[in-house]
Amino acid sequence: MSDYLWVRPANLTLPDPDENSVEFWEGLKQGKLLLQVCGVCTQTNYPPMVMCSGCAGFDFEWREAEGGGVLYSYVVTHQPIHPSLVDYTPFLTALIELDEGPRVTSNIINIAPERAKIGMRVKLELFQVNSEITLPLFVHE
Amino acid sequence: MAFMNAVTIAGVGETEYSKNSGRSELQLSLEAISRALEDAGIDRKEVDGLLRWSVDTSPEATVAANMGIEDLAWFGEISQAGNVGAALIANGAAAIHAGLANVVVIYRGVNGRSGRRYGRGDVTGRSGRGAAAYSEPFGLLTPQHGLALMARRRMFETGVTSAQFGMVAVTERGHANRNPRATFYDTPLTLDDHQNSRLIVDPFHLFDCCLETDGGGAIVLTSTDRAKARPGPSAMIRAAAQGGYSSHGFTDTAAVALAPRLWKQAKVDPSEISVAQIYDHFAPFVVFALEDYGFVLRGEGGEFVSSGEITWESGSLPVNTSGGHLSEAYMQGMNQLIESVRQARGESTSQVRDAQFSFVDTGIGTGAVVLERGE
């Protein structure tokens, strides 16, 4: 396998959880990628929604994702959009289609950007940024 | 149906396009408004409606005060970002059609190069709040990131190539080389230049990306009856529709939802359009718009472009005949709206002959207008 390991830019934006997403980010802190499932029609949402677009319900449950998925699309940032990114480009941003269906924007941390290929299998790997924030990242299996 | 030529774009005006205007965004708007009113032959005292992009920094009250408007009967703004120009046309025309205003001015003044820059995420990005909490922490920081993600998937699904995107840029540059107002008037571009240009956000090369520009533009809308005072051919609004959100698939632009509404309202179909201006924030989206508006079938847009069909004057549908956002200026749809008026009137530097119907999209489905030449 590859010995590549992506280094997350130190000053890249961190999520700022709000009242609609606090459970989601709390779940990650506890080691789980939680998918929001409508308690009425069972539609699965990512990111979590306020009202279910399938049935207009407000009652949701949380189900832990198995963690497997495939690379659905990706981009590689070459131009350092911000001075804080200068030492970190090029880097890969991936759209992962989870086996449960929803698509998650993330990073694949163990492959060099030029090795990304749509359809490749990936697996969840949680990445603790600090005591408050853990991000759902992925590795190529 | 809706407008059907009851409202006309009676005047257009713009400043020079540059990298450093040396004056305020408010002044750029006011200079453009003065030129547009002069073009329309309408006195500023007649203006009773103002309309703007919500990202524009010049409030309507400030513009009205500078213009000496006596009674601002109607005003508004549309949110999102730069992509709402045609939606503004639809809304301004609706206000006139409903009798809420007689003369509506739409304006945009922006120091997009010397001031806050979209390409650096100065205007959008880096909040981490709301929906951004699920994208920015992974590096989707600017508009182009999300669009590149969609473009990559659409390349995978339809087989369209970077070289075909490059032909959009090359074609538009050829049009800019005929337009003295264009930023790249003096500079040619080859497909090799495009393919060898550095990657910005792969799959987007440098020459897939729009310019960042300082400048101002303005448009005057009024009833077709009132607009008849101006001599010569006119740009009547045959149809104008708004869009911007749809629950279609990941690789569908918002044009998939808007297009059927537009063509039904216009009572023409895509094959009757002679010339098109299409929002080219990024070159690949010209290909996608050609497909999603129904000018060609999905998967055929790349070949349509690379075989010369969007090239003035030999192509069957010349696109972005002023050079567009890639090579004339990035005025967030304003310069494309102005060029569509020139085409309707017969005033373009790359004029399409007998262009009865002129099409303009300013956001790949956020809004689109069909203009008809009035004699």
Image (tube, coloured by chain):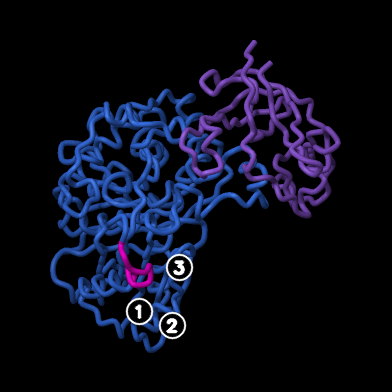
Chain colours: A purple, B blue
- The subunit carrying tag 3 is B
CA distance for labels 3 and 1: 25 Å
**Residue at mark 2:** B73
Pointers 1 and 2 in contact (C-beta within 8 Å): yes
Does the rendering let one see residue A40?
Answer: no
Decide which of tag 1 and tag 2 comes sooner along the chain. 2
Pointers 3 and 1 in contact (C-beta within 8 Å): no
Image coordinates for residue B12, horizontal then vertical, percent: 26, 66
In the rendered image, the vertical position of residue B170 relative to residue A108, given as above or below: below
Question: Would you say A111 lies left or right of B332 here?
Answer: right
Q: Identify which residue, B175 or B289, lies in the foreground.
A: B175
Report the amino acid beneath label 2.
Answer: Ala
Other residues around mark 2 within 10 Å, as few (<14) / some (14–19) / many (≥20): some
The answer to whether tags 3 and 1 share a subunit is yes
Residue located at (78% from left, 34% from top)? A33
**Residue at mark 3:** B57
Decide which of tag 3 and tag 1 comes sooner along the chain. 3
Query: Which element carries disc 1, helix, strand or loop?
Result: loop
Image coordinates for residue A47, horizontal then vertical, percent: 70, 42
In the rendered image, the vertical position of residue A25 relative to residue B1, given as above or below: above
Image coordinates for residue B311, horizontal then vertical, percent: 21, 37
Label placed on residue B102 = 1
Q: What stretch is highlighted in magenta?
A: B21-29
Other residues around mark 1 within 10 Å, as few (<14) / some (14–19) / many (≥20): many
Query: Which element carries disc 3, helix, strand or loop?
Result: loop
Among the 4 quarters of the image, the one containing residue B172: top left
Question: Would you say B337 lies left or right of A122 here?
Answer: left
Residue located at (30% from left, 70% from top)? B220
Can residue B27 be found in the magenta stretch?
yes
- The subunit carrying tag 2 is B
- The subunit carrying tag 1 is B
